[in-house]
Amino acid sequence: MAESANKRNRKKQLQKIHKEVITTHINADFDALSSMLAASKLYPDATLVFPGSQEKNLRNFFLDSVSYLFNFAKVRQVDLDHIKRLILVDTRQKKRIGKFARLAGKKGVEIHIYDHHPDSPDDIHGDVEVVRKTGSTTAILTRLLREKKIPVSPDEATVMCTGIHEDTGSFTFASITSEDYEAAAWLTRQGADHNIISDMLTRELTTEHLWLLNDLTRSAITRVINGVEVVITKVITDEYIADFAVLVHKFIEMESLNVVFALAQMADRIYLVARSRIDEVNSAEIAQAFGGGGHPQAASATIKNQTLIQVERSLNALLDTQIKSAKRAQDMMSSPIIEISSSETLKRAANLMTRYNINVLLVVDHDILQGYITRQIVEKAIFLGLGNLKVNEYMHIEFSIVHPDASLKEVQELIIRGKLRILPVVENEKALGVITRTDLLNILVGGPVIPEFLHDPKKGGSIVRKKNMAGTMKERLPENLIKLLNEVGHIADMLGYNAYLVGGLVRDIFLKHKNLDVDIVIEGDGIKFAQEFARNHEVRVRSHRKFGTAVLIFPDGFKVDVATARIEYYESPGASPIVETSSLKLDLYRRDFTINTLAIMLNKKHYGILIDYFGAQKDIKEKVVRVLHNLSFVEDPTRMLRAVRFEQRFGFKIGKLTLALLKNAAKMNWVETLASRRIFLELKFILKEQDPLSTIRRMNKLKLLQFISPHIKLTESIQDLLEEINKVIAWYNLLYLEEPFEPWKLYWYGLTSQLDAKAFKELTRDMGINRKMALQRKSGDSLLNSLFKFDGTNYQLYTLLLPYDTETLLYLMARAKTEKMRRLISFFFTKLKGQKALIDGKELLQIGLKSGPVFREVFDSLLEARLNNLTKTRDDEIRFVKDKFGDLL
């Protein structure tokens, strides 16, 4: 009888469960689970039912963690006829909820929907719909729990917070909203355990995973569709891999990709994982076409009854129709324009074309575009003796223009149909920029928008992916620096400027080298940007109006260099550059080597996008130092020294052409055109390197040392001395003394040790080096002689060495020929330097000594006694004073 009652109770319980069901989408993830849990707090009588499979991490979570929290039933246990209310969370697509789709539109069944996905044609319409654009559905439901003041336990808060973390990429995805942050903060206050969250979201890769990840990388192909770069990859495996989406995410992180469509053939099904970081590609729309769904940033689909080839073909055809370019003429143009007045001469036009290395000049009068003139016309006119005629005599006055808002398609039709070399972008008769054939070609094939005059047709285009570096920056840069860069982007947005992180820091992010030298380029007014930044933060600004640059100086001394995007040209070899305002493209083109031409966008909309106009990523990967153009060393001969420095620092090789150009510049002796101080500045950077000796040897091989001084020869004895200097510096660093020193000075002394005192003095004067260095070096030889003969007290050694700075003494230590001399200098640093009397002036007054000049004599005597081991304690010193100066007490 008891057994019969239990059966009746169980049947009654099942009927109650079946009346109200909470479900989600097939292949449920943590956001789906946490949304179901949150919904169960709003619908306490409802049963939770998965409509189909779940992600592996979610299954493991049930097996290993807190399954006791949930009132789950298996889908096969649910009788649809008993259901009166269906609660859908994290989906509303009919084809994604399994057999529960049959309840859509059924009379007598209420449907309540809570979702954050965008609308789709397959959406179910509910009696209650709460649909908002957030990073996670859990955030929507958490807000309702807060408003209704429904409590959650720490375990429930942990699961719910896990869902928010997973669906927002731990708050890194572009879809995140303030509601997600607020929900996570509230759940944290309810006791969410973030250590558990981290453990649950961590995926360990098996050997099989690593093989598949390798297959994803090797099979990846890149397509450029309407200027958008799309990566398509595929793998085949006999068994089902539950964590395929995780592997795709790893692949995206490794390659820093923006758009990826990954196909996997597993047994009799094809699985599609789609990811997009850009607005031009909506992953959800693509996945929906294959019966799946998701977000614009992340979506998936499971495809039956098709081969991998068929799916791949359908995917490519779909991408061709679905991906629309968002590029407008203003995004493609080179700006600011380089122009000439119609009243200027053809000779003047030729000079401008040569100065800026361009082939076409726009002709502008009073800000109104009049036409354009080409290098071909100008050169022919000058050849015919017409150089003094005005530009308006031979300029083209029939030309096409385009509005800044014109689409890529419009620009393409104008340039291709009209066979145009150049297309001005004009608004209200004012030319804002130009688009060249090369600009268009680079966009269509997926490369950077390189101005035609920066494009070397012999070398071909530099077709490089635009990567999003936000994740890599977060991983490799300090948190406070990431916050600073975000704030730079924010201020730039406020001013309507574009801001970029440029220079060595971007290069060293790739190389994984520590570098905190922050260089910012502003397309706009760099000084105005710096001033606005200072108004919003506790920083000082030091500006240089002539160059359009500024330095932000923070309270702790940290500095950020800010520059207006500019172009430099040289009126003669080795001369200081003439600076003019320009665009980022031209700003990067003026740099020394390709590896230093990378830029990262900091504005919020495009934060983290890497810009590589000149093949820097390729050269970094191949470990090559290359100049940007063949006259680079002629314009600035100091780049010869810099090329060697970078080559040795990074273990790179100077490119074949670059090396030939360097040797030619050295042979032509262009360095003679430089001021000695500019040469020394570059040399100083070399001597500050971790291993300057390798760079010095390379300079010697390339015959560059002669430009420092023709008297400097890298003999074996000089090399031995430099090696000894290395050892001495290493020894001194191990002492961990607080007194700072400058190692470069030791190498400078060593490199110039062959020079006599007079020659060294003249060289230091010409190079603007501190006169004290010449004086210290001059007396160094006599000091070595004194040390060789020394046989005095500790105090006498102290007074002998104290006048010399640390660098000079360490240099002399490296030069010392005997162990005795080295030991004396070592003893000075470790035992004598920095010593002082234990008692102070106050105690001298207490003894009865009157304040006055005698105090100096007393302290000198105390120091002598202490160094000579005559006193050791404070009491010893007091007795010493009373004994020696008793007549003054």
Image: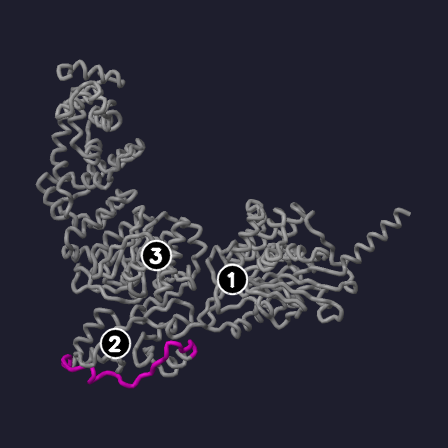
- Looking at the image, tell me whether mark 1 or mark 3 is earlier in sequence order: 1
Q: State which quadrant residue 593 falls in.
A: bottom left
Q: Position of residue 644 (x, y in %)?
A: 26, 51
Judged by its main secondary structure, the magenta piece is loop
Circle 1 crowding by C-alpha within 10 Å: few under 14, some 14–19, many from 20: some
Q: Which residue is mark 2?
A: 361
Residue 537 is covered by the magenta coloring = no
Mark 1 element type = loop
Q: Is residue 632 above or below residue 517?
A: below
- Looking at the image, tell me whether mark 3 or mark 2 is earlier in sequence order: 2
Residue bounds of the magenta highlight: 385-409
Q: Which residue is mark 1?
A: 175
Q: Is residue 469 above or below residue 842?
A: below
Q: Residue 536, which numbered label?
A: 3
Q: Is residue 369 left or right of residue 146?
A: left
Instruction: Say if residue 465 shows up in the picture.
Output: no
Q: Residue 259, which numbered label?
A: none
Q: Is residue 131 above or below residue 866?
A: below
Q: CA distance from mark 3 to mark 2?
A: 41 Å
